[in-house]
Structures are given as structure tokens and as C-alpha cells.
């Protein structure tokens, strides 16, 4: 135990390069390139007029910084350097515009025109590439066990092994890690995890414990614990609002992780089952800490020690689920709501989520580490091996 605690402490002090070091970026403005020489690069008055027309067609608000830059360049092209008197401090809008124009100093009309046209051209191509991305929500990155799309500011990570009730293989753990890393960096405002088919997820794929590697059971348990810790860490550190759309029954790790989501919407068909004792295992996904915190100790014990399966209504009453929807209206109502949420300001949402979670982060990493240490031992126990053999034994008798 002491060795396990020391190893957890050492790991918790290790720098986590995943999301921790990366702050959510402010809106990224197009880079304006200065071309001061070279007749070939000069843009004409006709190009300038065309850029003005293109600007009117843009759908996305580029933000105040870009709007001020455009204003300043436009004034410089049409009127030359700023000579009007500086507005008073309290006239914020006029002062910001004056500052932007005045900051161009004696920039020539030709160069100002050049910059204006380039800026508009960058905005047009940025908008058309994001439209192309939105209108082709194909599976990203060639994932084999997931279907990942980004549309309407929402990155949707869909577990995609419906014939196996979306049981999570080692490949799928790795792909979910990759998908979360990508979603943290992409343009989306919120990230959703859901399942394909009638199940949300049947938990860890029990075949993960039957493919014994060359190094034997010990190596399998050690590698499993490392992968599990990394997997759960990605949920702890995920920087944007993370939403579970629980489209059907959920088992094992897919339930325990719910405490690390920011919102959990469930169909009334969903059930929530953590049969760890039956399997000779122990809780993970930080549920040994989050479940008592969310639902109180005795209700958490019924689930985590005594395998009590909850209905969606019960899970909602205990605070594990945010809201339950009738199955027939589930997809329509949930996605309508999520689309509205995804129109809220991206950075404000991300920073607020990080504030809410930051107080607990170190604790959660320590809990994750301890849970993985305990499971590493459990996976080598007779209790666990017998339970897994029994699952496959029952199947073979059918
Ligand atoms: C390497 C890192 C390891 C990290 C481990 C982290 C610790 C995690 C712990 C857990 O998640 S514990 C929970 C594990 N899950 C289970 O015990 C569920 C087992 N499955 C079932 O009890 C049932 O399959 C079901 C989910 C209740 C569904 O029953 P139903 O009768 O409706 O369907 P089935 O015919 O049983 O399933 C269809 C098909 O899918 C296969 N399957 C389902 N779940 C799993 C699973 N978890 N692992 C492996 N395979 C699973 C099932 O065997 C069927 O396969 P076929 O017979 O059609 O080949």
C-alpha cells in the first residue's frame, strides 16, 4: 500500500502535457502580411471594391479586433492618415476606432489597400474552410471504433461497436484519448460522447483480459493500469464542456466516468450499472470519490459495492444524470438543446468550466492513480479471473 501511495504521489507530480499546459486560445485572427514592395503584389482599386463586397457576404462576426483593423485600413485607403481630433476617453467606440486608424501612422494608401484586400481574403478562406468542415461531418482521422464529427460547433464522439454494445477495447480507449485531444484543440464549443445502437456502452470489453501478452498476466495488468490512468486523466483535464448523451443502458466504466462530465442527458430507456464486486474488481473513473460526493455515501455504496442497477429516473434523482427524456423524443430534444448551448461564447464556456473543475483536479488525479493501482492488483486476483471466465463460459453455453 505504501509503495502504491508513493508511486501515485510521484505520478501526480509528473508534468501532464495533455491539456494542462495548454490554455484555451483567444479567437485566432487572420495574419496580415505586409507587402511593401513589388509591383506584382500590388492590388488594384477594383480588388479593393471587390473585397468590400465580399466582406458584406461574410456570415461570421470576426470580432472587434478584426473589425477595428478593417475600419482603420478602410479609412487609410479612402482618406489617408488620421488627422481628426482624438475623441474623449468616455467615448469608447469612437476612441477605439480613432486609435486603430491613428496607429497606422503614415502607411501609404497603396499598402493600406493591399492589407485590406489580404485581410478580407483571409477571412473569406477561413470562413469557407470552416463551412466545408461543417457541411462534411465525415468520420475524422479514420477512427475504427468511433465515429467522430464536428458540426454546429459540437464535436460528437460516438462509440461505434453497436454489435458489441459499444464495449471498450484497448484500441477504443486509445482512440477516445486521441478524439478528446483533438476535440480540445478544434473549433468546437462543446464535446459530446454518445453511443451507436441500443446501448450507450457495456463498459470495458472483457476480452481485454483474455488476450494475454508475451510478458504474462502481470504485464497485462501493468499495461492496463497505465492505459486506464491515461484514459481517465483525459476526462479530468478536458478543457471544454463535456456532455454525455446516454442513449441506452450504461455499464461499468461508462457509468463511473459520468461524474467527470459537465452534463449528462439520458433517455428513459437508460440504466446505470456498476457490477464491480460481481466481477471481482473495484471502482474506477474517479467514482470512488465522485459518486459519494454526488449522491451521498450510502447510495454510492449501493451502486459501487452492491451492484445496484439504477433506472434513469433514479440516477437523475441522485444527481448523476442531469435530465431524463422520453426515448421517442430523446435525440430530437437533446440535440436541439445542445445546438443552442453550442452558440454560447466558446472561451467564456471553457474558462468557466475550468474554474469549476480546477479546485478538484489534483485530488481527482490522485484518486485516479489509487484506483488504477488497486485495479492492477484486482485483475490478477482469482475473484476477477473467475468472474471473467464465468462471463465467457455462460456465453459459450448459449
Ligand atoms: C485495458 C484497460 C482496462 C481498463 C478496465 C477498466 C475497468 C472497467 C470495468 C468495467 O467496465 S466493468 C463492466 C464490464 N462489463 C460487463 O461486465 C458487461 C458484460 N456484458 C453483459 O453483461 C451483456 O453483454 C449486456 C451488456 C448486459 C448485454 O446483454 P444482451 O443480452 O443484451 O447482449 P449480449 O448478447 O450479451 O451482447 C451482444 C454482444 O456483445 C458482447 N459484449 C457485450 N458487452 C461486452 C463486454 N463488456 N465485453 C465483451 N463483450 C461484450 C457480447 O458478448 C455479445 O457478443 P457475441 O456473443 O454477439 O459475440
Image: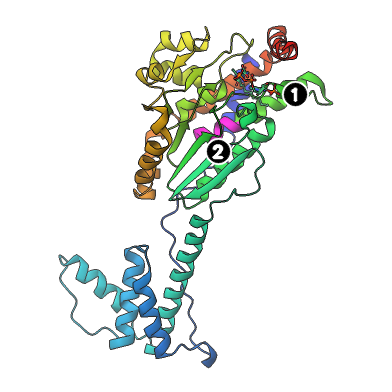
Residue 194: percent from the left, percent from the top?
51, 34
- Magenta residue span: 230-238
1 or 2: mark nearer the eye:
2
Whether residue 231 is in magenta: the answer is yes
Q: Which residue is drawn at 65% across and 44% down?
A: 143
Q: Quadrant of the C terminus?
A: top right
Could you say which is closer to the camera, residue 76 or residue 336? 336
Could you say which is closer to the camera, residue 273 or residue 380? 273
Give residue 158's mark.
2
N-term mark: 1 or 2: 2
Q: In this view, does 292 lie above or below 328?
A: above
Q: How crowded is mark 1: few (under 14 residues within 10 Å), some or many (20 or more)?
A: many
SS at mark 1 in the image: helix
Q: Is residue 349 above or below residue 127?
A: above
Residue lying at the far front in this picture: please name it: 328
Q: Residue at x 41, y 89 (%)?
A: 46
Give residue 122's mark.
none
Q: In which quarter of the image is the N terminus?
A: top right
Residue 238: percent from the left, percent from the top?
49, 38
Where residue 16 sits, quadrant-wise, is: top right
SS at mark 2 in the image: strand
- Can residue 18 be seen here? The reply is no
Q: Residue at x 29, y 82 (%)?
A: 75
The residue where tag 1 is placed is 220
Q: How far apart are marks 1 and 2 (CA)?
A: 27 Å
Ligand 1: give its quadrant.
top right
Whether residue 172 is in magenta: the answer is no
- Can residue 279 be seen here? The reply is yes
Where residue 206 sits, quadrant-wise, is: top right
Could you say which is closer to the camera, residue 392 or residue 97? 392
Amino acid at each position: 500500500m505504501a509503495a502504491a501511495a508513493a508511486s501515485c504521489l510521484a505520478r501526480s507530480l509528473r508534468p501532464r502535457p495533455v491539456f494542462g499546459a495548454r490554455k484555451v486560445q483567444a479567437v485566432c485572427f487572420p495574419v496580415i502580411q505586409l507587402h511593401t514592395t513589388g509591383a506584382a503584389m500590388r492590388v488594384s482599386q477594383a480588388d479593393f471594391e471587390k473585397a468590400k463586397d465580399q466582406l458584406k457576404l461574410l456570415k461570421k462576426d470576426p470580432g472587434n479586433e478584426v473589425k477595428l483593423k478593417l475600419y482603420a485600413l478602410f479609412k487609410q485607403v479612402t482618406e489617408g492618415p488620421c488627422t481628426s481630433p482624438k475623441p474623449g476617453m468616455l467615448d469608447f467606440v469612437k476612441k477605439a476606432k480613432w486609435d486603430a486608424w491613428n496607429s497606422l501612422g503614415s502607411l501609404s494608401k497603396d499598402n493600406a489597400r493591399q492589407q485590406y484586400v489580404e485581410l478580407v481574403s483571409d477571412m473569406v478562406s477561413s470562413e469557407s474552410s470552416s463551412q466545408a468542415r461543417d457541411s462534411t461531418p465525415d468520420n475524422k482521422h479514420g477512427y475504427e471504433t468511433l465515429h467522430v464529427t464536428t458540426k454546429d460547433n459540437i464535436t460528437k464522439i460516438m462509440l461505434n461497436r453497436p454489435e458489441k454494445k459499444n464495449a471498450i477495447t484497448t484500441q477504443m480507449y486509445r482512440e477516445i484519448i486521441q478524439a478528446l485531444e483533438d476535440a480540445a484543440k478544434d473549433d468546437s464549443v462543446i464535446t459530446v460522447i454518445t453511443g451507436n445502437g441500443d446501448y450507450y456502452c457495456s463498459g470495458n470489453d472483457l476480452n481485454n483480459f483474455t488476450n494475454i501478452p508475451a510478458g504474462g498476466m502481470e504485464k497485462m495488468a501493468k499495461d492496463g493500469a497505465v492505459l486506464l490512468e491515461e484514459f481517465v486523466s483525459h476526462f479530468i483535464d478536458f478543457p471544454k464542456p463535456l456532455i454525455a448523451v446516454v442513449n441506452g443502458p450504461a455499464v461499468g466504466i461508462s457509468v463511473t466516468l459520468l461524474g467527470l462530465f459537465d452534463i449528462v442527458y439520458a433517455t428513459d430507456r437508460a440504466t446505470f450499472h456498476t457490477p464491480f464486486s460481481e466481477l471481482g474488481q473495484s471502482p474506477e473513473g474517479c467514482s470512488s470519490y465522485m459518486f459519494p460526493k454526488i449522491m451521498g455515501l450510502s447510495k454510492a455504496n449501493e451502486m459501487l459495492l452492491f451492484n445496484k442497477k439504477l433506472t434513469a429516473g433514479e440516477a437523475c434523482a441522485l444527481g448523476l444524470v442531469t435530465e431524463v427524456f422520453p426515448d421517442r423524443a430523446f435525440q430530437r430534444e437533446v440535440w436541439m438543446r445542445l445546438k443552442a448551448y453550442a452558440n454560447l461564447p466558446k472561451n467564456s464556456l471553457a474558462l468557466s468550466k475550468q474554474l469549476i473543475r480546477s479546485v478538484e483536479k489534483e485530488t481527482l488525479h490522485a484518486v485516479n492513480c489509487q484506483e488504477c493501482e488497486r485495479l492492477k492488483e484486482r485483475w490478477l486476483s482469482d475473484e476477477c479471473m473467475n468472474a471473467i471466465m464465468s462471463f465467457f463460459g455462460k456465453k459459450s453455453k448459449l
